[in-house]
Image (tube, rainbow, N blue to C red):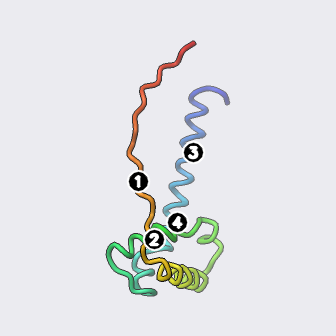
Amino acid sequence: MVSKEGKNARRFTQFIGKLHEENIIDFYFTPELVRSLVGLEGEELKVFMQLFRPTYEFVTTSNYYEMVKYIKSKYEVFKLHPNLRPLRELPDIKLDVKKEN
């Protein structure tokens, strides 16, 4: 339970669970669906999908019509703030940390 292998196994299990949730969201919240509902293309579509990505809980508990309502309501917010952009990705930083006993 407290060994390094146990800790790594729990971390890996959490990672796989999160990856599974992201795949479920991607399955329902697709660019094709958003494009067909609101007509966004290219960079605007990408920005919209990054800013208004639904949660796993919403995706698993909602039906198609609730998803359509969600996308259309978020599009209204997107139209009100056309310059709204997601934060840029932070660079990976490798730190050389040495443990001292």
Q: Nearer the viewer, mark 4 or mark 1?
A: 1
- For label 1, the crowd category at 10 Å Cα-Cα, with few meaning under 14, some 14 to 19 and many 20 or more, is few
In this view, 74 is above or below 16: below
Camera-side residue of 98 and 1: 98
Name which of mark 1 and mark 3 comes first in the sequence: 3
Which residue occupies 47% across, 20% down? 98
Cα–Cα gap, marks 4 and 3: 17 Å
Secondary structure state at the residue bearing disc 3: helix
Tag 1 residue: 89
Marks 4 and 3 in Cβ contact (< 8 Å): no
- Given contact means CB atoms under 8 Å apart, are the residues at marks 2 and 1 in contact? no
Residue placed under numbered mark 3 in the picture: 13
Q: Amino acid at mark 2?
A: Leu
In the image, 26: left or right of 7? left
Q: Amino acid at mark 3?
A: Thr
Mark 3 vs mark 2: in front: 2
The answer to which of marks 2 and 1 sits earlier in the sequence is: 2
Q: Position of residue 93 (x, y in %)?
A: 40, 38
Name the residue tied to disc 4. Answer: 24
